[in-house]
Amino acid sequence: MSKRAWGFRLFFTALVAMTAPPSLAQPHEKETWIPVYITPYYEAAQTREGAPRVAVNNGLNELLSSNKQADILAARDLVEANPATITPFSLMTLAIRMYDTGLRDDAVLWFYIGKYRAVTLVETVTFSRGPMSDGVYDAIGSYITLAGPYFNGYAFCDPDKQKATNTAAIDWVEAHPYQTIYAPGLASRVKPGGVEANLAKSIASLRESAAKEAAQMDDPEFRAEFMETRKQNGMDVRFCWSA
């Protein structure tokens, strides 16, 4: 696994969920929205009530800029209707807006889907060095490092639910291969082994990583320590609240 791809996964280990993400909230306030800035794709508004700037997909941008839950669900429906070429950036932005509008369970699923689609991309295709490829890596890393802790912060309120969601996300990514990987323009960049073999290997590795994480969380001693650490770090107050 490449150093960069490994780094993308590292941020989604259980230990990340122990640490509170950077936020505008005070230590004992609820995290009701995700105030992150990922140029040029997403810029949160200055306040929760404001409209963010979204530039991920011409067909989704307006819906994802809305603070109406119905519009965010409409964007999800468009993604589900045509998932083949939806970018990881679009998927992770959808997740942010789901979280912001109160759809936190769905938000975790779609963020994991976006992250795993990104992993299969970088483990299948080699990006040559340059402004464009560096920008792709940087943006993926920014979504994962800046927004990811919010999703894990909430997801690990219930480790069993998180495990099921994690599995469902990998299932979705396997069932809906990112068709951009097959684009003629990327043919010369496919890593040795070919698209299908690399993609299958990536999915298998994702499942292996998920199984290891699940086994760790299933250990009673580790889980007790993990949950206590979260509590001491204020994670329960910030994330484990009911609407």
Image (cartoon, rainbow, N blue to C red):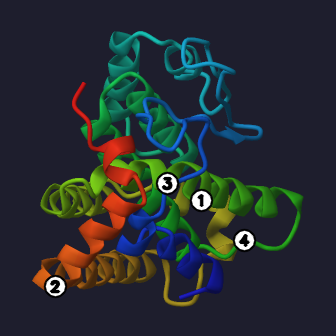
Task: Please tell me the numbered disc located at residue 148.
Answer: 3
* Alpha carbons under labels 4 and 3: distance apart: 23 Å
User: Which residue was labeled with disc 2?
Assistant: 221
Amino acid type at mark 3: Gly
Above-or-below relation of 155 to 239: below
Are discs 4 and 3 less than 8 Å apart at CB? no
Q: Please state if 38 lies on the left or on the right of 163 as rendered.
A: right
Q: Earlier in the sequence, mark 4 or mark 3?
A: 4
Amino acid type at mark 4: Phe
Q: Nearer the viewer, mark 3 or mark 2?
A: 2
Above-or-below relation of 150 to 50: below
Q: Please state if 205 lies on the left or on the right of 43 as rendered.
A: left
Residue 105 visible: yes
User: Which residue was labeled with disc 4?
Assistant: 127
Are discs 1 and 3 less than 8 Å apart at CB? yes
Q: Position of residue 191 (x, y in %)?
A: 59, 83
* Alpha carbons under labels 3 and 2: distance apart: 25 Å
Q: Position of residue 25 (x, y in %)?
A: 55, 35
